[in-house]
Image (cartoon, rainbow, N blue to C red):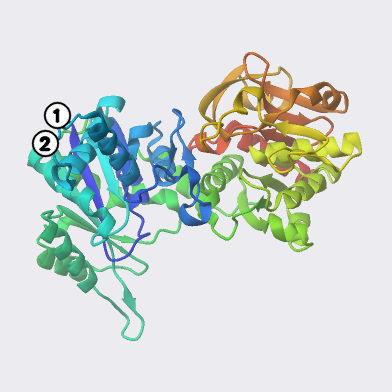
Amino acid sequence: MDTKYIFLTGGVVSSVGKGVTAAAIGRLLKERGFQVSIQKLDPYINVDPGTMSPYQHGEVYVLDDGAETDLDLGHYERFVDISLNKVCNTTTGQVYAEVIAKERRGDYLGGTIQVIPHITNEIKHRIHMVARTTGAEIVLVEVGGTVGDMEGQPFLEALRQMRGDVGVENSLYIHVTWMPYIGATGELKTKPTQHSVRELRSIGISPDMILARSDHPVDQELCDKIALFCDVEPRAVVPMVTAEFLYEIPILLENAQMGDFIVERLHLEPRQKPDWRVWENLVREMRREKPKIKIALVGKYVELHDAYMSVREAVRHAALEVGVDDEVLWVHSSELEKGRGLELVQEADGIIVPGGFGERGIEGKILAARYARENNIPYFGLCLGMQVMVMEFARYVLQDDDVNSTEFDPSTRHPVIDLMPDQRQLSDMGGTMRLGLYPCQLQPGSVAANAYQVEQVNERHRHRFEFKNAYRAQLQDAGMVFSGLSPDGRLVEIAELKEHPFMLGTQFHPEFLSRPTRPHPLFKAFVSAIVSTQKS
């Protein structure tokens, strides 16, 4: 069959949940037997979010092929349970860089380069590449930002042209909008949605479906009003009240018959009947009252919880599987250095130190690792969190607080974390990065091997610095187990401590491969260790 395209735009305000909506729609279609992929079009001029502060854009989500992407791709992968690739996140920076490179090579034969057709053609090319590289039958495309944003206009123009390129029967436009609530009168207002749709139509895009987001119930009368003034069928207006739980959104959209409407409008016949039993059990488990565990997440960017979106979700997946409720205590590592926030660490049943870059807050993370080691508190270190764990243990073994990483102290006497020799001459910010999926060989009998129940795994990486092998024997003799290594034995991927309930760090980011119905084995082992220590 011809590839089908679903385009999602946003109106009124940003952060209305287009990413989660796209992910949930992807799940609706997968449940009907279709092969789905999802693409995010980001209007910013950065080539990717890899060099952006997490305060600016939340976490950087890494794919199998090493692409550093928007956090919405995490929602896509988690909901639909697929693996995406680098073409699934396209930015203005990537588009202009490619067009300028072609112009420099003379590909345009001396022609004048313009937004239309050159920029829009490159955008359309990248949209088509999703189907070609993933084999998807249905491609969902989400445009970042809102209608009316200056930087988003080339993307919207490209989307307008796509209907003519692929045909009306192969394209569907969904507008996700926000309905504000006026407290003084107790009313939800549709006027901003009407204005947003009018703006979209002035560009040449008439939405086929409107998803009306709100914090308050939306009655049928309001849906009919939106349908009338925005020129869509009444059943094409889907009210979406803010859900209590993220993972019930696909079920809510299914109950609103959104999936049936989409396949009908795209002239598709479902290949199977949707089976939501696993998801319904998941939501039921979320609602069930369960024992609670508290986990201190000690990070540098905790003011913005989106900076640790995948970690937060991976903890939730594991907690649901183990049968407990998790409460995350957000601890700022810089504040911990000043003696503030220690009571949260002491209150916690387990400690997670996630990834990050830069010196700020490092000693606070080391303090958290020391507290976990000395008090037998389950500890899980992710990327930098593993390096911090190694640094803290090496300080204890060597009785020297000068132990450090050359990332933070180039002149340290004991660089237990360092650049590999072949990285030293590289100068680009991304040039020294180990990005994407790499194999890891597990040591039999270790905590990691018992968690995975296999001999070798593949995990996603995003880091520059590695464990320095000159210290491997010394730390092993003192009780550290290097339970995961690269297949050639050269790189340490997992470190753990003997004689501890659970103190384990990974050089990779296991959170990126956790799924709501398939939690990551190491997160599950961490949560299980917390439950075991509570009972003992």
Task: Tell me if mark 1 has few (under 14), some (14-19) or many (20+) residues whose alpha carbon lies within 10 angstroms of its own.
Answer: few
Numbered disc 1: secondary structure:
loop
Residue flagged by tag 1: what amino acid is it? Asp
Left or right: 481 with respect to 235? right
Question: Which residue sits at x=84%, y=41%?
Answer: 402
Instruction: Please indicate whether residue 481 sits to the left or right of residue 263 in the image.
Output: right
Give the Cα distance between marks 2 and 1. Answer: 9 Å
Question: Mark 2 near mark 1, Cβ–Cβ under 8 Å?
Answer: yes
The one nearer the camera, 27 or 339, is 339
> Farthest residue in the right direction?
399
- Inspect this view and state whether residue 349 appears: no
Task: Locate the N terminus and report the quarter of the image it occupies.
Answer: top left
> In the drawing, does residue 141 fall left or right of residue 448?
left
Horizontal arrangement in the rendering, residue 66 relative to residue 266 (left or right): right
Front in this rendered view, residue 354 or 47: 47
Task: Name the residue carrying label 1.
Answer: 2
Q: Which mark is residue 166?
A: 2
Quarter of the image where the C terminus is located: top right
Residue 230, relative to residue 399: is it above or below? below
Q: Residue at x 17, y 42 (%)?
A: 113
First of labels 2, 1 by sequence position: 1
**Under tag 2, what secondary structure?**
helix
Task: Say if 520 sits above or below 190 in the image.
Answer: above
Measured as percent of width and height from the top left, residue 150 is found at 25, 59
| Residue at 14% across, 48% down | 160
User: Which x, y percent locates residue 234?
Assistant: 14, 60
